[in-house]
Image (cartoon, helix red, strand yellow):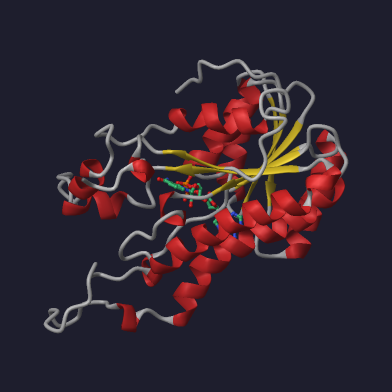
Amino acid sequence: MTSPFVHDFTGKVVVVTGAGGVLCSFFAKEFARAGAKVALLDLNLDNAQGYADEIVAAGGIAKAYKANVLELPSLQAAKEAVVADLGPVDILVNGAGGNNPRATTDNEYHETDLPEGTKTFFDLDQSGIEFVFNLNFLGTVLPTQVFAKDMVGRPGANIINISSMNGFTPLTKIVAYSGAKAAISNLTEWLAVHFAHVGLRVNAIAPGFLVSKQNKALLFNEDGTPTPRTGKILGSTPMGRFGEPSELIGGLLFLADENAASFVNGVVLPIDGGFNAYAGV
Ligand code: NAD
């Protein structure tokens, strides 16, 4: 996976949370390939370390840090280590996030005659909803509090959040994840306004449908055949296919690039093959 675009982030320090995961490890690699010094933060240090090692082996500058985006002391410790190792932070990518089955209903529509054992909206437990909402929303707010403090007034500094298609219109079944991503889109606009006088831009990308480990079980049966949900997604995506992680990179680097996007602020950029634009008729 490579990006055809040329952005120069030489000398910039980029923090990516959730960088032990599928998409954000790729984001970290692409920032490093564009010259940035990249701090890969993740709850799973082994995964983040593995990706940092890959970046260094390819000639880039990267370091991995264990950090929990839901715990301020953990984030503060990571920030101090990043600044000591790589220098002051220029760009923050709030990537840690995801859904969880404990906040996902089995059924798209509530019916009076659902089969016994169906996990309905009424069966979702509070802790599952809290887990997903906190991971995505609070897990974007807290790293922003910790890292943005010293980014204020720093030329070119900016933040990229990760929203989703469900941030525009909720997707069935995933009630907490949809609500949390809508909150992230809203937060992106709020932060963009809040920091506008101190030169800190805040934008988001909203990836469309990609196949990843967190949604694979919803998209494909165990035998690899597509689920009905996959048919609906592709039928609602005018370009008629899933996206590739590499197709997020142009938007990500564009928004982060102070030369390309110096007047772009508070934008939630759909990268979705037209899904968000399509009413279905
Ligand atoms: P992923 O599950 O591969 O990676 C998420 C990473 O976050 C993991 O490495 C995990 O260890 C880390 N993490 C979880 N809890 C954490 C915590 N408390 N503190 C620090 N790190 C923590 O997910 P992904 O598919 O790479 O998704 C990355 C982002 O993109 C998420 O915000 C996700 O919601 C969003 N997104 C993904 C898709 C998609 O199709 N994959 C679509 C739209 C948006």
Relative to 126, does residue 148 appear above or below in the rendering? Answer: above
| Left or right position of 81 against 142 | right
Query: Could you tell me which residue is drawn at 66 percent across and 33 percent down?
Result: 256
- Image position of 94 with respect to 3: above or below: below
Observer-nearest residue: 237 or 90?
237
| Residue 200 position by quadrant | top right
Q: What residue is drawn where x is 63% and y is 33%? A: 255
Whether residue 76 can be seen here: yes
Residue 211 can be seen, yes or no: no
Number of numbered discs: 0
Residue located 86% across and 47% down the image = 150
Q: Position of residue 116 (x, y in %)?
A: 15, 83
- In screen coordinates, is 163 left or right of 144? left
Q: Relative to the observer, which residue lies in front, 62 or 170? A: 170
Q: Position of residue 2 (x, y in %)?
A: 48, 20
Q: Position of residue 58 (x, y in %)?
A: 60, 19
Q: Quadrant of the N terminus?
A: top left
Relative horizontal placement of residue 261, taking residue 152 as reference (left or right): left
Please state the horizontal and vertical placement of residue 4, each as a whole percent of the image: 51, 15
In the picture, residue 100 is in which quadrant? bottom left
Quadrant location of the C terminus?
top left
